[in-house]
Image (tube, rainbow, N blue to C red):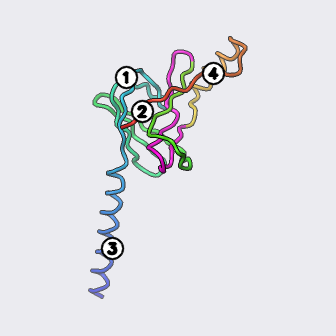
Amino acid sequence: MKRNLIGILTLVVMSLLNASGAYAQSFVKADVPFAFRVGSAQLPAGTYKINVTGDNIIAIQNGRSSALSSVRREDARNTGPKLVFHHVGSQYFLAEIWRGSGNAGMVIGRSKMEKELEKELQLASGRSKVGEEVLIALY
């Protein structure tokens, strides 16, 4: 009985060390030169650390500001490490995070504000596409 308990405790400790090691390596940094939105949070320009805090949750933070967002995993693509923003009108919305070739991407769903702004601009301009994608390198 004592031997089984020691074996189980050893497995638990090893799995915890393994899990914490995986999350410790799961952050990237980017210098974002403009204010942007993540969901309903407005973040100023600055250097941001993006950390995967769970299977479908990311934390975006710099010294002054932070936001949490749920993400959807995308299959790995042959792409470099980058952030993808949707630029709609005068607003920037964080849309995708790619940590490099061979890594799964993370996609943030369009917020209600982004959808409404796109709709307003489409009606005003008469065009079906009103925004553009802006890429920022990760390091």
Q: Nearer the viewer, mark 3 or mark 1?
A: 1
Q: Nearer the viewer, mark 2 or mark 1?
A: 2
Q: CA distance from mark 4 to mark 2?
A: 25 Å
Query: In the image, what residue occupies the spot 28% across and 86% down?
Result: 3
Q: Residues within 10 Å of mark 2 (few under 14, many from 20)?
A: some
What kind of element bears circle 4?
A: helix
**For this rendering, which residue is in front, 84 or 137?**
137
**Residue 36 in the image: x percent, y percent?**
45, 24
Q: CA distance from mark 3 to mark 1?
A: 44 Å
**Residue 93 in the image: x percent, y percent?**
51, 27
Is disc 2 in contact with disc 1, using a CB cutoff of under 8 Å?
no
Q: Residue 130 sits in which quadrant?
A: top right
Q: CA distance from mark 4 to mark 3?
A: 51 Å
Amino acid identity at mark 1: Ala
Q: Residues within 10 Å of mark 3 (few under 14, many from 20)?
A: few
Q: CA distance from mark 4 to mark 1?
A: 22 Å
Q: Residues within 10 Å of mark 4 (few under 14, many from 20)?
A: some
Q: Residue 10 sits in which quadrant?
A: bottom left
Disc 2: which residue: 137
Q: Nearer the viewer, mark 3 or mark 2?
A: 2
Disc 4: which residue: 118
Disc 3: which residue: 11
What kind of element bears circle 3?
A: helix
Q: Which mark is residue 10?
A: none
Q: Counting residues from the N terminus, which is met first, the one under dot 2 or under dot 1? A: 1
Q: Which residues are magenta?
A: 89-108
Disc 1: which residue: 45
Query: In the image, what residue occupies the spot 50% across and 32% down?
Result: 84
Q: Residue 128 sits in which quadrant?
A: top right
**Residue 63 in the image: x percent, y percent?**
28, 30
